[in-house]
Amino acid sequence: MTARVLFVCLGNICRSPSAEGVFRALAADAGLNVETDSAGTSDWHVGSPPYGPMQKAAKERGFDLSDLRARQFTARDFDAFDLIIGMDASNLENIERLRPAGSQTPVQIFTDFAPETGMDHVPDPYYTRDFDQTLDLVQASSLGLIARLS
């Protein structure tokens, strides 16, 4: 069975595309059969590639995000994915506002899969400028999610 996982942040140019890119690469290395996508709860950057500094930081770690383009999260995503992962509590609130009646699709914060980090969210590097911290959290959370799905 193929797991379908959607990563969601605010603008879909930093956190969620890095989560998608890192997770898909690590999942492939682990032999896990997954389909991935990412989206933003806002429409500010629809059609844009990931933020340049985020792409650069990811590329330095061997992760290519260049094929990704921002899109907006929609209620249809609850039917299209088996698991929806938000980067922070605000993302989860915005996701849940669009949940269709009767939908049972689980929604979780990404760092739930990496409790050892001591973080309850992935900070937005667009504002913090700490792209390495984001990638550290995304890698740890990806490995935890892979372990859970394996």
Image (cartoon, grey):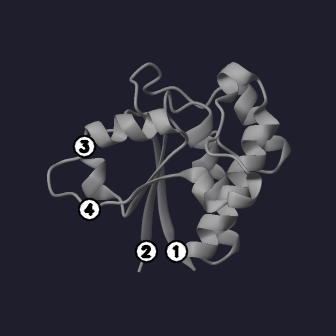
Can you give x and y, in whole percent of width and height, for residue 34 in the image? 50, 68
Q: Which one is earlier in the sequence, the residue at label 1 or at label 3?
A: 1
Q: CA–CA distance between discs 4 and 3?
A: 13 Å
Indicate which label's residue lies in the foreground, 3 or 2.
Answer: 3
Instruction: Residue 33: give its label.
Output: 1
Q: CA–CA distance between discs 4 and 1?
A: 22 Å
Above or below: residue 78 compared with residue 150: above
Indicate which label's residue lies in the foreground, 2 or 4.
Answer: 4
Specify whether 16 is left or right of 130: left
Can you give x and y, in whole percent of width and height, for residue 77 in the image? 30, 49
Q: Which residue is mark 4?
A: 104
Secondary-structure class at tag 4: loop
Task: Please say whether residue 67 is visible from this viewpoint.
Answer: no
Q: Which one is earlier in the sequence, the residue at label 1 or at label 2?
A: 2
Q: Which one is earlier in the sequence, the residue at label 4 or at label 3?
A: 3
- Type of residue at label 4? Gln
* Residue at 26% over, 62% down: 104
- Type of residue at label 3? Ala
Specify whether 58 is left or right of 71: right
Secondary-structure class at tag 1: loop
* Residue at 63% over, 74% down: 147
Q: Which residue is mark 3?
A: 75
* Residue at 57% over, 52% down: 110
Q: Which one is earlier in the sequence, the residue at label 2 or at label 4?
A: 2
- Image-quadrant location for residue 128: top right
Instruction: Residue 79: give its label.
Output: none
Q: Are marks 1 and 2 in contact (CB under 8 Å)?
A: yes
Q: Which residue is mark 2?
A: 2
Q: Are marks 2 and 4 in contact (CB under 8 Å)?
A: no
